[in-house]
Each structure stands twice: as structure tokens, then as C-alpha cells.
């Protein structure tokens, strides 16, 4: 079976304008959205593609990426 890179990459970041960690969802070089905690609930912000059209993504890939994003945010924070 051939292994391929996931369509949606999850990267955890600490943006300077946020007090919490954010799981970014990337499709190639474009930011699809962010998952973050806000007042005890998980929020998803979705951004439009740079092309001005709409996203058309494999639903299973999106669900798997969202699960990865949530799991990454639930990991214990490393202390410095």
C-alpha cells in the first residue's frame, strides 16, 4: 500500500494575539482554519481559500484532521 501525505496538515501554534494554543489546519500552503478552546468549548474558524472559490475537500479527511486537531489541543502542555 502506498503511503501519501495527508491532505490536511495539523500544526499546533501559539499565536501572539491569543492566550491559548491553536491547531491550524493547512491544505498545502493555504490556511483552511483553526481549532481552539474558547470559554470551555472547542471552536472552529474556517477561512476562505485565496482563490476566492470554495473549498471542496474529502469529508473523511476533514473529520480525521479535526480529530487530530482536537487531540493535539488535549495533550498535556510541556513545561519550559
Image (cartoon, rainbow, N blue to C red):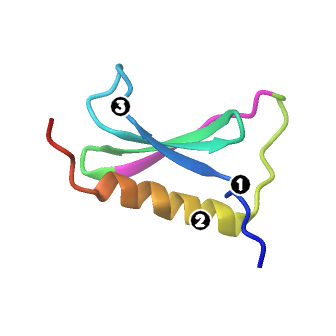
Label 2, secondary structure: give it: helix
Residue 63 tag number: 2
User: As drawn, which residue projects farthest toward the front?
Assistant: 2
State the residue at coordinates (72%, 40%).
Answer: 28
Observer-nearest of 56 and 78: 78
State the residue at coordinates (34%, 52%).
Answer: 73
Which circle's residue, 2 or 3, is located before the other in the chain? 3
Horizontal side, residue 80 vs residue 35: left or right: left
How far is disc 3 from disc 1 in space, using C-alphas?
Answer: 23 Å
Q: Is residue 10 magenta?
A: no
How far is disc 2 from disc 1 in space, using C-alphas?
Answer: 12 Å
The reply to whether discs 2 and 3 touch (Cβ–Cβ < 8 Å) is: no
Which circle's residue, 2 or 1, is located before the other in the chain? 1
Label 3, secondary structure: give it: loop
Q: Residues within 10 Å of mark 3 (few under 14, many from 20)?
A: few
Q: Residue 70 location, x and y as percent?
A: 41, 58
Q: Residue 42 location, x and y as percent?
A: 37, 52
State the residue at coordinates (40%, 39%).
Answer: 22
State the extent of the magenta-drawn residues as a range: 42-50
Q: Residue 51 location, x and y as percent?
A: 84, 29
Locate the N terminus and report the quarter of the image it occupies. bottom right
Residue 14 tag number: 3
Locate the C terminus and report the quarter of the image it occupies. top left
Amino acid at each position: 500500500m502506498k503511503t501519501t501525505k495527508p491532505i490536511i496538515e495539523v500544526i499546533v501554534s501559539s499565536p501572539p494575539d491569543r492566550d491559548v494554543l491553536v491547531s491550524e489546519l493547512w491544505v498545502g500552503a493555504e490556511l483552511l482554519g483553526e481549532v481552539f478552546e474558547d470559554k470551555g468549548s472547542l471552536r472552529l474558524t474556517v477561512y476562505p481559500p485565496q482563490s476566492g472559490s470554495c473549498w471542496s475537500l474529502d469529508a473523511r479527511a476533514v473529520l480525521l484532521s479535526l480529530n487530530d486537531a482536537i487531540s493535539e489541543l488535549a495533550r498535556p502542555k510541556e513545561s519550559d
